[in-house]
Amino acid sequence: MKMHEELVQSFNDAVKKELESAYKYESMALWLRYHNLDGMAHWMHLQAEEELEHAVKFREYIELRGNRVRLMAIQEPKGDYKSALETFEDGLHAEIAVTQWVLSMRELAIKHKDEGAVLLLDWFIREQEAEENTAQSILDKFTLAGITHETHHGAAIYLLDKELGARGK
Ligand SMILES: [Fe+2]
């Protein structure tokens, strides 16, 4: 059964938002790599790939329901950051915003009594919980290592860069 048009609009927006997230993380990766933080850049790049997978998941669901996917213009990401810490802070804020969006989509799915859409969104809510948790843990490590917005070199940032560079997927 096709999804209600209002829900389709919201799923199309979700595709756009996930692509924007990917673009944001990729922009952070580029900034970090330019500043020789290759490990953090690697982490951000993998995160960008994960966001692309999310966009695909939303897109495939729209198609599965027999609705039409419409791609929209995506916003140019911020390109300059004052520090490595700022990139991860921005990442957490972006994840929180996405969580809010997914929750509002779920409300809409409930309004239209669309159980299938609710099920998919439940998966996304769990995913967002994990994303927020990971982002917060990394920020906690910045704090633990004493890395601030003013830290651009030193053993602490060197080691955290190495640790984040070990991310497998
Ligand atoms: Fe995502």
Image: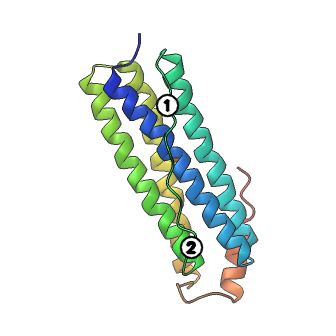
Asked whether 101 or 154 is in front, the reply is 101
Instruction: Please give the label number shown on residue 141.
Output: 2
Question: Which badge, 2 or 1, is on the more N-terminal residue?
Answer: 1
Residue 105 in sight from this viewpoint: yes
The image quadrant of residue 122 is top left
* Number of other residues with Cα within 10 Å of mark 2, as a class: few under 14, some 14 to 19, many 20 or more: few
Whole-percent x, y for residue 68 in the image: 48, 22
Q: Secondary structure at mark 2?
A: helix
Whole-percent x, y for residue 140 in the image: 51, 72
Q: Amino acid at mark 1?
A: Arg
User: Relative to 109, is 39 above or below?
Assistant: below
Separation of marks 2 and 1 at Cα, in angstroms = 40 Å
Q: Residue at x 47, y 16 (%)?
A: 65
Instruction: Please give the label number shown on residue 70.
Output: 1
Asked whether 26 or 76 is in front, the reply is 76
Q: Respond yes or no on whether mark 1 lies under 8 Å from ligand 1.
A: no
Instruction: Please give the label number shown on residue 13.
Output: none
* Quarter that holds the N terminus: top left
The mark total stands at: 2
Q: Residue at x 43, y 39 (%)?
A: 13
Q: Amino acid at mark 2?
A: Lys
Q: Secondary structure at mark 1?
A: loop
- The answer to whether the residue labelled 2 contacts the one labelled 1, judged by CB atoms less than 8 Å apart, is no
User: Relative to 143, is 92 above or below?
Assistant: above
Whole-percent x, y for residue 128 in the image: 46, 47
* Residue 95 as seen in the image, left or right of residue 80: left
Residue 164 in sight from this viewpoint: no
Asked whether 144 or 46 is in front, the reply is 46
